[in-house]
Image (tube, helix red, strand yellow):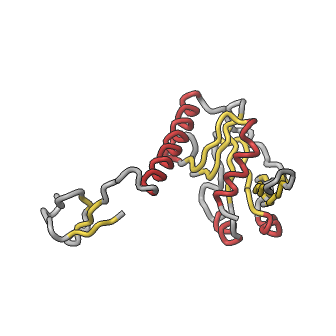
Amino acid sequence: MTTKELEYAINKHYFNSAKIITTKLSRNSGVVSHECDVVVVTNSYYLIEFELKISKSDLKKDFQKKHSHECDNIKKTFYVIPEKLEDCIELIPERFGIIIVNKKIQIDKSGKIPLEKTYYPLRIIREAQTNKKAKKITNDNFIKICTLASMRYWTTKENELKRDKLIIWQKAKICDNCQNRFSLICRNCDNFNNWEDKE
């Protein structure tokens, strides 16, 4: 199972009970003190963090981080893991909730053509402890989260257009003289002939 599938499972489960759901909320946002894989803004304007792990080594590595997933703006933190890692839950400290995601394929044979549907049921096997210091986010923070979610959506759309060659994006040039990035002439060393295209 991939991280994208875990993101999808969280979105499907919480979509109707959240103000907004976004991925990769970074500390640069000014809303949280560390990067969060998925954040749900609840209807009462609290943040719930979801840390996604798809391997045992990745799970172990997470507990070496200095921030320890502590932030005054986060009310609860859950670890979200695929079913294959269920035997690793003893590695996760008690204060974190645990969500197990399964992947199932259902075949609907009621019509003339059988339809295959993939879905991701999840089980909350341990509720997260509540951070009693957690505060509701401000309107400004909520707008920041909405803006970042919107930017991420439109960046994805732009990348789809590039992939489908519906828009052309000029490649950056890397000067092989000084490794400076430039669009036509290297302004760092005025080199014109010696460059290579890079994505």
- Which residue extends farthest left? 190
Give whichever of 21, 91 is nearer the camera. 21
Residue that appears at 54% across and 48% down: 26
Give whichever of 191, 111 is nearer the camera. 111
- Which residue extends farthest front? 112
Horizontally, is 183 left or right of 81 in the view?
Answer: left
Quadrant for residue 116, please give it: bottom right
Q: Is residue 67 above or below residue 17?
A: below
Q: Position of residue 109 (x, y in %)?
A: 85, 55
Q: How many marks?
A: 0
Q: Where is residue 101 in the image (x, y as percent from the top left)?
A: 78, 58
Quarter of the rendering occupied by the C terminus: bottom left
- Which residue extends farthest top? 139
Give whichever of 77, 107 is nearer the camera. 107
Residue that appears at 68% across and 51% down: 8
Residue 99 visible in image: no
Give whichever of 158, 68 is nearer the camera. 158
Horizontally, is 9 left or right of 127 in the view?
Answer: left
Residue that appears at 45% across and 48% down: 158
Q: Position of residue 71 (x, y in %)?
A: 63, 45
Quarter of the rendering occupied by the N terminus: bottom right
Residue that appears at 83% across and 51% down: 111
Horizontally, is 195 left or right of 190 in the view?
Answer: right
Q: Where is residue 185 in the image (x, y as percent from the top left)?
A: 17, 59
Q: Is residue 146 above or below residue 83?
A: above
Residue 142 visible in image: yes
